Image (cartoon, rainbow, N blue to C red):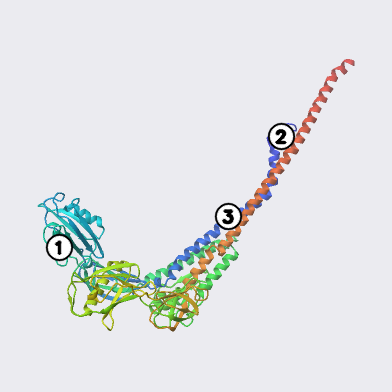
Amino acid sequence: MAGISSLGIGSGVLTSDLVDQLVAAERKPAQNRLDARSQKNEALISAYGTLRSAMTELRLPLRQLSAPDNLKAFSASSSNDSVQVSVDSTKASRGSYTVNVLDLAQAQSLASSTFSDKNATAIGTGSITIQSGDESKTLTIDGSNNTLQGLADEINDAGIGVTAGVVDTGSGYRLVMSAENTGTANAITVTVQDDDGTNTNASGLSQFAFDGTTQNLEETVAAKDAAVEVNGISITRSTNTIDNVIAGLSFDVTEAGVTSLVKVDQDFGAVADRVGSFVDKFNALQSTIKGLAGYNSESGQGGILSGDSAVRSIQSQLRGVLTRVVPGLENSSIRTLADVGISTDYRTGGLSFDRAKFEEALKSNPDDVTALFAEQGRSTGTDIEFLRGGNDTRAGEFAVNITQAATQGGVMGDTALADGITIDSSNDELELAVDGSTRVTISLTQQTYPTAQDLADEIQSQLNASTALNAADQSVKVSLDSNGILNFASGSYGNRSNVSVMSVEDGATLGLSVKTGTVGKDVAGTINGQAAEGEGQTLTVTGAGDAKGISIKVGGTATGDRGDINFIEGIGDQAVNLVTSIVGPDGAIQAKTDRISRDSERIQDEQSRLDDRIKAYRDRLVSQFTAADSLISQLNSTQDYVSQQLASLAPQNNQKN
């Protein structure tokens, strides 16, 4: 290529500019074709990306409508700001409730007597055991920490739900202990082992004792449960959040002595908003498709995807889902979108939404409207509840056959519980293990119980108030069998369900001994004749077949034929699956973009071959032009030589003449 700079010296004609012009003329037709194909592919990739984005935007409102809970939204109002209410639409139902707040929950505080110095005055040595709720710890007090501040630091480091501080009263120092959690179940108990040999007097460590019999600390704030009446029914909770009273409702109370009227109504407007969002996104998709694949009569040109088979297929499949009768609703009053005010404009392909008609249909036929959009399972059997379907579950009617009902694990006492039992510090503690994961220690109220049932009720009350069980969302049911023997049953079902007695302070009094309970059983059976896996009361089909993925909850104890589940796959659920399949990695849009990407790779290969061919063509021209230029240069040199020779002969000839 270096020689190209000297082209034309010999001839003055075969220059490098001429080579460039010839090369450009040779490249132009092929390069134009490659550029046009590349630009078209880039435009197609962009168009399919725009189409994918518009379809993905449609999937969100469809996904919301495919969830049954989103079609039965509820809202709640409270007539008093001191009673705030929150709603879980998955569990709530319409209703009106009068909430009367009798008392607020509060955390207990205890204060010691006055000491002259917080860091120098000795408070005694020994050990102090502090308990709050299910947490307790024994603290050793010796010469390194036997001051008010030393004791406060030990308590704060213990991590048992009790905090401590030292207050300067102006006339001395007092230790203040406070429970971190509200409620009587979290009241503080302090027991002492004083090195002076006396654990109950007002000297040494004993002055900090505060238990069922000795109260050497001052209770400055009493532990209290929140107390409310809901429609006249008395309710107590350890916190000021009152839940698990009315399904789907939770009350937060902030002031005692107030009454509020709480109303729960279905929020038809919220559901209509979700449907309206779906209509808007669908119409936006139609506008996108029109821009990409439509025909412009003014310009006489179609969009870049005009006539595209993938676009036609997408529109056809969407129309099929949105206009047909939902299988399973053939005999219902609500069968298609048109029945709830959603109609198709044949001119634009878009949807129109009659909001008033939709809300009226939702009020009149909530179950059918829900089934129109979301999956729904309708059971013909008693104690059979549909939970959910799977991605592969097909619409249809599935028979349920149970071979084993689920049971609750638990433990039985040894002997009958007597009437008139007195509970004191020698027999008030009981420790249980629940569902293999939670250890619960309860302290029974020290008193005499007139009947065995009264004592069983006390045990139940203490278990209900257990923070450990509540935190783990577990429960234990306490009952007396026909012989008066205590029975502890786990609130859960299946092979993870159990109750065991880990320790009992006086087994003879309660008729109990340390023993491992009997594990519960999982439900077993088939759905649609397909084998299903049981977990607790839940039965799920995992193998192939029309019922694959369906889950039901089976209550009761009966076995054999338990009825049918009619599974209805609503439009929202169908459309979500359709859109997911179209925009997914194996969908039509990805197939198109993959094909274009492969063509773009071929264009790159053709571009490389063209560049190689043009380079060879240029090299050949340069070589040919160089040779021709050299020859012409030689001829010019010969011409110059001959001319010089002839010129030199001319004077001689003139002299001779």
Q: Secondary structure at mark 1?
A: strand
Q: Residue furthest left?
A: 171
Pick out the residue farthest to the top.
Answer: 655
Mark 2 or 3, nearer chain start? 2
Please state which of the two labelled residues, at mark 1 or mark 3, is closer to the viewer. Answer: 1
- Residue at the spot 62% in from the left edge and 56% down from the top edge: 599
Of residue 51 and residue 578, the one placed in the foreground of this image is: 578
- Using the image, tell me which numbered label, if any, was put on residue 7: 2
Inspect the image, locate mark 3, and give the three-letter code of the amino acid beneath it. Answer: Glu
Q: Is residue 38 above or below residue 650?
A: below
| Mark earlier in primary sequence (2, 1) | 2
Q: Residues within 10 Å of mark 3 (few under 14, many from 20)?
A: some
Closer to us: mark 2 or mark 1? Answer: 1
- Residue 10 appears in the rendering: yes
Q: Disc 2 versus disc 3: distance between alpha carbons?
A: 41 Å
Q: Amino acid at mark 2?
A: Leu
* SS for callout 3: helix
Q: Quadrant of the C terminus?
A: top right
Residue at the spot of label 1: 219
Residue 126 in the image, given as x and y percentages of width and height: 18, 57
State yes or no: discs 2 and 1 in contact (Cβ < 8 Å).
no
**Precedes in sequence: disc 1 or disc 3:** 3
Dot 1: within a 10 Å radius of its alpha carbon, few (fewer than 14), some, or many (20 or more) residues?
some
Image position of 278 (left or right of 447): right
Q: Nearer the viewer, residue 141 or 296?
A: 141
Q: Amino acid at mark 1?
A: Glu
- The label number, if any, that marks residue 42 in the structure image: 3
